[in-house]
Amino acid sequence: MYKKVILVHGFFKTNRDMMDLKKNLEKLGYQGIALNLPLTFHEIQYGAKCFENKMDKILNNLSKEEKVSLVGHSTGGLIIRTFLSNTKQINKIHRAILISTPNEGCQLAELADKKFPMMTSIFKTLKTLTPENVEKLNINHRKEVEIGVIAGNKSDLLLRKLIKGENDGRVELYSTQYENSIDSIVLPLNHNEIHHQFLVAQLIDEFLRTGKFSK
C-alpha cells in the first residue's frame, strides 16, 4: 500500500490549513506532505506551475516501487487536476481525491468579479475561479489515475444566500461533482470544516485502499 499523501490547500490559505488532515492521516498510518502554494494573489496557472516544480522534486526522489497519492481541498483540487493533465510522471501517482473542489467554477467568484472587480484584480486566484476562467484552464482527464470526490452540503456560512442551489456555504454542490471520478460521497459538512474532520481522513484512507467509498 502506498503511504505518501500530498496535501494541497485552497484559495487564501496556506499549508497550515491542511495540518489537521495531515495529523488525522498520520493516525491512520500515512505520511502526509502539506505543500505551501501561492493561491491568493496569483492566477491558478502560476500556483499549478509551482506545484509541478515541487512535485517533480518529490517524484524524482521516489524509489521504483513507490507512488504518491494526491488530496486537494477546494482550489487545491483544481491544482491537482491541472498537474495530472500535464505531468510526464503520471505512473508515479496512485490515486487522487478532490474535496469540495469547484470543478465547474464558483458562483461567488463570478459575483465578486462582476460586482467588485478591484477585489479580483488583487486576489487573482479568486478571479480564476469563475466558471468561465475554470473552463479556460483546459484541464484534460488522465484515465491512468482514479479520482474520488468528497463534498459537503451544509450551507451555514456567511454569503451562502448568494449561492443558487444546494451548496456547502462556498461552492455549489453540482460544481464539486466531477464526471470522470470513479466514486463520490456527500457529507453534511460545510466548506470550511470538511477537511478538518477525522471522518474525512477515514474516507480518504478507504478510497486510497479500495478505490471507492462506503455509503
Image (cartoon, grey):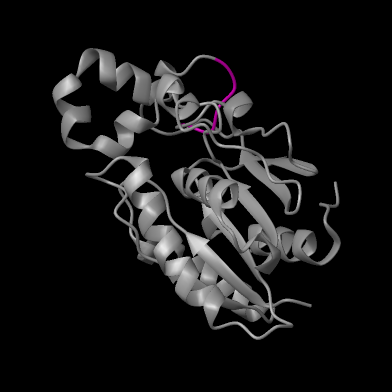
Could you tell me which residue is drawn at 81 percent across and 67 percent down?
209
Could you tell me which residue is drawn at 19 percent across and 20 percent down?
117
Which stretch appears magenta?
165-169
Residue 99 drawn at (x, y percent) = 58, 47
When the figure is inspected, residue 16 is found, relative to residue 212, above or below; the finding is below
In the rendered structure, the answer to whether residue 55 lies left or right of residue 2 reads left
Asked whether 94 or 165 is in front, the reply is 94
In the rendered structure, the answer to whether residue 12 lies left or right of residue 192 reads left
Residue 102 drawn at (x, y percent) = 52, 34
Could you tell me which residue is drawn at 76 percent across and 46 percent down?
143
- Asked where in the image residue 14 lies, by quadrant, the reply is bottom left
Could you tell me which residue is drawn at 38 percent across and 24 percent down?
108
Number of numbered callouts drawn: 0
Q: Quadrant of the N terminus?
A: bottom right
In reply to whether residue 116 is colored magenta, the answer given is no
In the rendered structure, the answer to whether residue 147 lies left or right of residue 159 reads right
In the rendered structure, the answer to whether residue 117 lies left or right of residue 209 reads left
As drawn, the residue found furthest toward the bottom would be 63
Q: Does residue 19 appear in the picture of this structure?
A: no
When the figure is inspected, residue 9 is found, relative to residue 44, above or below; the finding is below
As drawn, the residue found furthest toward the front would be 88
Asked whether 65 or 185 is in front, the reply is 65
Residue 68 drawn at (x, y percent) = 64, 71
Residue 12 drawn at (x, y percent) = 30, 47
Magenta region's main secondary structure? loop
When the figure is inspected, residue 105 is found, relative to residue 164, above or below; the finding is below
Q: Does residue 24 appear in the picture of this structure?
A: yes
